[in-house]
Image (tube, rainbow, N blue to C red):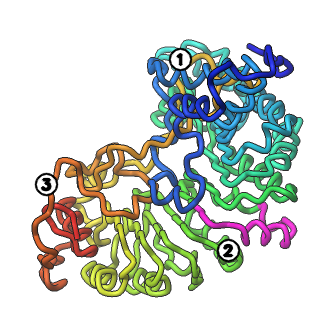
Amino acid sequence: MTPLSSKPSSSNLPKDLPPELWKLILSYIEPDYEQAIPIDKAIARRQFLSVESFVPPDPRDSLANVGRHSIGRLRLVCRGLAEVGAPFQFTQLVVRFSQKGLRRLDNISRCPHLARLVKRFTYMVPYFFEEGLDDFDQIRDDLRQEGLKNFNKLREKADDQQEIVDQRLDVHVLKRAIANFTSLQLVQLLRWTEHEDRIVLDYLKRHEEARRAVNLDWTLACSHAGQTVGIALLNARKTEPNRFILPFASPSSAQFLRQSKPNSVWTLAEKLTCLTLHFDDADDLEGKLQDLSELFHAIFTKAAKMKAVHIGFPPQRPLTLPLEKIFHHVKWDDLIAFGVQGWELEESEIIGLLERHKDRLKGVRLRDVHLKDGSAWKEVLSFMRDEMRMLQWVSLRRIGYTAYYTSAQFQQHPGAEVPPFLSDSEDDSDDESEDDEPIPGPSTLVDSDDDSNFDEDSDDEHEPHANDMDFPSFSPDTPASASWCNCSGDDHLGSAEELGDTDIVVSNTKRKHWERWVLRRCPEHGER
């Protein structure tokens, strides 16, 4: 690999090609290097957050390989190309929790001309080994039968984690790096698993007795990573990111904020414009969130500039706390996109929050939301249709009623109605695909959002986008296969009574029909 100290062979750009043309060429190699920036463009182009952002490119994809290696090599040709190519390589920075990944992060942060380019920082964190691997020896043979071929790699990873934590390597590197990322706008913390991790996790799921001796723990990993990133953010005076994404959150990862200096926390909250949290802690989640209720209140009250917020919970274990235990009747004057997932609510709770923001909201997502007895979806839908004139998109995937969710009929086939929320970032390659030096390739290897070929009107409830948390386009998007609408804008359903909201089950076909009705769109073509 090319060391960081390597210098371009000359100072001038190749003749006959101005910098603008080189930028155009590089944009074809790495077209999405500035995705999700700025926030309005991010939401409008469905680049806020998507499942595809968490999946590495197929190593067989020649274009992905070109993007991974060629820009860094091209930058070594001359100083001119080094300067032109730098934003394509470092605007989005993806770093793994490992000594190799932290060394790479440290190298980049020590180069001021590169550090100031970083706008989006994605931190890939693995499951933590609770007690090291000494006790894994007793199940080594079983794991080999499960397909684990490289036990030494597992042990090396455990030792690597322990050394990082014991020596506080991550704390020191993250503090320096985030302090030097003076253009940082978005921080994203994702869960990262490799092939051997998934083998162990699958084995432990099926052998409860083995979990008493050894375990891989995400709560511990998320809490540690959340605290170290939080500490680094609180200590960075010139870095003020305004977007935070944590799709695998653990409540314990936020506990450290209670012990932090209030002024530091409030300063970060005051800059916040976009927040995505999805909690997946299985151990007394409601109790832990109840304990964090006042913290939510304090942060949301200070976050007066909020434009987009999504708070989600496991679809298989929807939250039963009142909505305002999290949102506390806060009103955001600039809020344009709002979403919740995995919740049992009263119709009045949803309408009350929408009422506060009805004059600004352009998008609403209510995923895996179940109305309690005595509530009706037609009341919620009527409010959105009649009162929210700015609304441009609405997502109601897998909505329903608590009466059905708790019924024997649902319990017999739960997987068909509530698919998993998000899969982990996975990497089956033996090579870590990271370089100690920042020169060799773009840092968007794991984080390439894809907002193409999306069909909000698809009949497939389990299509690849079915579990996305990203915010759809703010402009009407008719599927390319649909003919032009000649319906003259007629309201095909005149009242909520005609919605057919008479059962405890909301089919996929019905909810799509409801989405069009709310937006006053043609039920056949999707147009207004």
For the residues labelled 2 and 1, the Cα–Cα distance comes to 47 Å
Specify the segment rendered in magenta: 256-275
Q: Mark 1 points at which residue?
A: 148
User: In which quadrant of the rendered image does the N terminus lie?
Assistant: top right
Left or right: 149, with 473 as reference point? right
Kind of residue indicated by mark 1: Leu
Left or right: 260, with 202 as reference point? right
Q: Residue at x 33, y 76 (%)?
A: 371
Left or right: 10, with 449 as reference point? right
Residue 280 pos. (x, y %): 53, 54
Q: Name the quadrant containing residue 185.
A: bottom right
Q: Which residue is drawn at 49% across and 35% down?
A: 55
Numbered badge on residue 303: 2
- Residue occupying the far front of the picture: 16
Residue 196 pos. (x, y %): 56, 23
Secondary structure character of the magenta stretch overall: helix
Closest to the observer, 14 or 427: 14
Up/down of 24 relative to 495, above or below: above
For the residues labelled 1 and 3, the Cα–Cα distance comes to 52 Å
Q: Is mark 1 on a helix, strand or loop?
A: loop
**Camera-nearest label, 3 or 2:** 3
Q: Mark 3 points at which residue?
A: 483
Quick one: label 2 or label 1, which is nearer the N terminus?
A: 1
Up/down of 446 relative to 368, above or below: above
As for residue 265 lying within the magenta part, the answer is yes
Q: Can residue 215 be seen in this view?
A: no
